[in-house]
Image: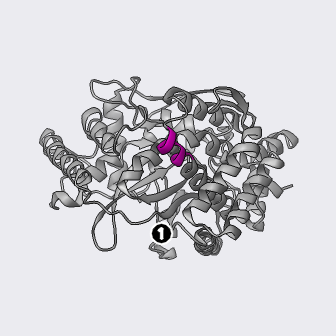
Amino acid sequence: MGQEIALTQFEEGDFIAFHQKLAQETALLKQMLTRKSCSSRPPVAGFEIEAWLVDQAMRPAPINRQYLATLNDPLASAELAKFNFELNCDPEPLTGEVFGRLHAQLERTWQNASRHAESMNHRALMIGILPTLAQSDLHIGNMSDMHRYKALNEQILRARGKPIHIDINGAEHLKVDHHDVMLEAATTSFQTHIQLPPDLAHHFYNASLIASAAIVAVSANSPFLFGKELWHETRIPLFEQAVETGGFAGAARGPLHRVGFGSGYLRHSVIECFEENLAHFPVLLPVTQDTGAEQFAHLRLHNGTIWRWNRPLVGFDPDGTPHIRIEHRTPASGPTPLDAIANAAFYFGLTHNICEQVISHGLPLTFPEAKDNFYQAARHGLDSTIVWFDGSRHRIDHLLRTALLPRAAEGLKAFGVNPTDIDAYLGVIRQRIANKQNGSDWQRRFANEHERNFTEMTRTYLKSQNSGNAVSEWP
């Protein structure tokens, strides 16, 4: 969950004081990682999922304040827009029947969230971009009542000094200007977390970069924005452009972006990401805390304003020992709880298998190849062609069937995941590939067959989502 802050207005001294504390905490984290003082627990998995509130006409409903107050669920929180909310989970050891347990958690919390929305004569919906969303819905009046979001908006616009310009060229072309960060609220995601021993974390981060193309292709669920068909996963370019502010000296269009694929592989440790955060990204939320440096309050808040698609995080074990997690942010929200957990299983398994190869044989792709693969897969989904480990280009659907699903299965076995869980959740991905129908494919097909009636499409999507059937089986 995003950290709330106490202030929205800042002075120059606030930035200086915050940067000093950030430097101290970055140095302390490096020292703790070098001395192996961080948690070395076996892998632990978790997730966050963002969702929409819609009215009976399938339009965004800005009611999350009253919705969350009456839902009264500690695992639910507000997102940037008043028509979005987020659900979290209790983390689970990544072994045994972990995906069955995570699935049961998500089903419980989602059913409770859905029933509560219905009791308010509204609906809860998990989808990457709401098809009925209009640009006019994305205004400051629909921003959630949190200091964090107001301050982020002010600081990002101050850093840019000009309107936000969206230019996405896909099946169709969209060019719009916007005057606040609310465009980010058009994108909702399913974010997986894995806590790892620090010696393994940077290898797993690198493997996540390589695996990201396959994950975004199979999980794509955002083909439309403001009535135009763009990328299979339009969240990717939209989020990157909606918060387009870069490093120091106004380098918004330089090599380092607050939202992006990253600047390269890690060589020795995840500390390299945090050192890059310190050296290259201006502070956006300079709220100093009266906590000890070992709580990493400033490092964590600053890291929360840099949205790599794969992002290392600092958290804490129940006994207070700091730990390292890798957050994977590429999958869209939805289409169902079952699909979401299947996406998580595929990500964890494939990435672990690639990680083992990286450790034993080195990196099998250059960073530019992994990055290009990711954007090709986001743009073309299951129709994309990517470079693989043999140096040749492959259709991603063929690669998924012949190489990546078996790799994911081997990775999950290495984690000690129950074979029943492996078969059940990877089976969802296998069927999705066989039927060539992820959420994006279903939306594109429905829109083509129904003259882009986005209201009816959203209504049918919601009905199918509530059926519990995986998206590969939707008519």
Image point (87%, 42%), residue name: 449
Question: Under tag 1, what secondary structure?
Answer: loop
The kind of residue on which mark 1 rests is: Pro
Residue holding disc 1: 91
Can residue 21 be seen?
Answer: yes
Q: Main secondary structure of the magenta part?
A: helix
The answer to which of 442 and 47 lies nearer the viewer is: 47
Q: Position of residue 248 (x, y in %)?
A: 28, 28
Q: Position of residue 81 (x, y in %)?
A: 49, 52
Image point (22%, 54%), residue name: 35
Display colour scheme: one colour
Give the side of residue 94 with respect to residue 252, left or right. right
Question: Dot 1: few (<14), some (14–19), or many (≥20) neighbours within 10 Å?
Answer: some
The quadrant of the picture occupied by the N terminus is: bottom left
Image point (20%, 50%), residue name: 31
Answer with the quarter of the image where residue 431 lies: bottom right
The quadrant of the picture occupied by the C terminus is: bottom right
Can residue 221 be seen?
Answer: no
Q: Position of residue 372 (x, y in %)?
A: 57, 28
Q: Position of residue 377 (x, y in %)?
A: 65, 35
Give the side of residue 259 with respect to residue 466, left or right. left
Image point (66%, 30%), residue name: 386
Q: Which residues are magenta?
A: 354-361
The answer to which of 79 and 262 lies nearer the viewer is: 262
Residue 355 on the magenta span: yes
Residue 143 on the magenta span: no
The answer to which of 245 and 256 lies nearer the viewer is: 256
Q: How many marks?
A: 1
Give the side of residue 186 with respect to residue 290, left or right. right
